[in-house]
Amino acid sequence: MFLKVGELAKRTGLTVRTLHHYDSIGLLHPTGRSDGGYRLYSRDDVARLHGIQTLRRMGLSLADVAQWLEGGAVTSRAILARQIDALDQEIAQSQALRERLGVMQSIFAGGGQPEIDDWLASLSMMNTLEQYFSAGELKLVFERWKRCASEWPPLLQAIREAMERGVPADSLELQPLARQWMDVSARWMDGDMALLNRWGSMLREQPGLPLPSGMDRSLLDYISQAVQLRLAALARYITADELQQLDKTLEPEWRALGERAERLIGDGAPPQGASARRLARDWQNLLDRWVRHDSGLRDRLLAAYENEPLIRAGAVFTPEVRRYVQQASGGT
């Protein structure tokens, strides 16, 4: 596969003039030319371009880039020493490059020799991502993805099945999946809602950005509608800052506690019994951890559960479990 200079420029975010300049100084010669005399770039050419752009972002001159790539007289140690003695901005750029390469390593973690489309997608993707995030943020995002990567495929499959069955985006039936989407997304971003909102903005503003396997724009729009309805219901009770305050790492513990309650109910354990009272204490402790011991926030969230069908529909605890816990706590 060969690319003409215009297509290569378009797909990497560079200018044709830059590529012509690289050719004229011997930094990046195209592998061949068409019958009409147009420059033709191969996979190896694109891989070399990737290296050139990476080193340029480090702050190296084009002459040093050429010597680095060709193994000339300027050694890696000499170049790094020169960089250490440079301006603070260049030092920051060097650190950003290290983080950027870590991101690239995550993108190509599957192994093997990247093809031309992989290099092109990588260059284009990094140019887009860096409009929204620092290299350090991107490194954390890709590292954290591994924590919940196994949770996405079954969730995406469940959402797709609901969409194909014609379940309306504003139905209560979809709310449990909307809550799961919010939970997995929040744990992916380690509870940083500002970072998650920027990621969402990027996806909306950059329709050409690749999506994870199993996800497409129609599915993303579908579940986003349900999530926005849930957030709107919550906004009637808590602020954006209070939403950020919630400990979003506790979902697995909530699920385990809900399953424990359902077992007690299934076994016929009375709410006044010792097992049920222990459950109620654990539920209260987990609730306090969730709101970070903010009693006012706790009360408003409980009010949201009681008053908002959307919130109840997506909650980990079913109404039956909630009543059981209330009775075990001494409530009505």
Image (cartoon, helix red, strand yellow):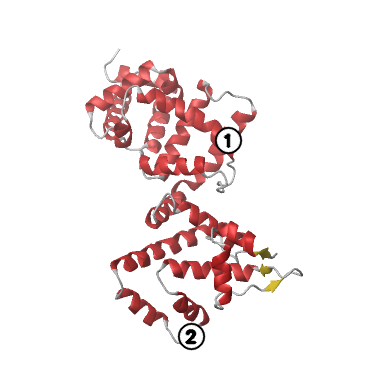
Q: Is residue 315 visible?
A: no
How many residues crowd around disc 2 within 10 Å: few (fewer than 14), some, or many (20 or more)? few
Residue wearing tag 1 = 219
Residue 298: quarter of image: top left
- At 69% from the left and 68% from the top, the residue drawn is 38
The quadrant of the picture occupied by the C terminus is top left
Residue wearing tag 2 = 72
Element assignment for label 2: loop
From the viewer's perspective, tell me whether residue 168 is left or right of residue 132.
right
The quadrant of the picture occupied by the N terminus is bottom right
Q: Residue furthest top?
A: 332
- Check disc 2 and give the amino acid type: Gly
- At 66% from the left and 69% from the top, the residue drawn is 42
Q: Vertically, is 223 above or below 306?
A: below
Instruction: Give percent across and percent down for residue 304.
Output: 35, 21
Q: Vertically, is 163 above or below 130?
A: above
From the viewer's perspective, tell me whether residue 92 is left or right of residue 196.
left
How many residues crowd around disc 1 within 10 Å: few (fewer than 14), some, or many (20 or more)? some
Real-space CA distance between mark 1 and mark 2, rounded to the nearest whole angstrom: 51 Å
Residue situated in front as seen by the camera: 75 or 292: 75
Mark 1 / mark 2, whichever is N-terminal: 2
Q: Is residue 99 visible?
A: yes
Element assignment for label 1: helix
Instruction: Give percent across and percent down for residue 113.
Output: 60, 67
Q: Vertically, is 47 above or below 312?
A: below
- Check disc 1 and give the amino acid type: Leu
Disc 1 versus disc 2: nearer the observer: 2
Residue situated in front as seen by the camera: 163 or 323: 163
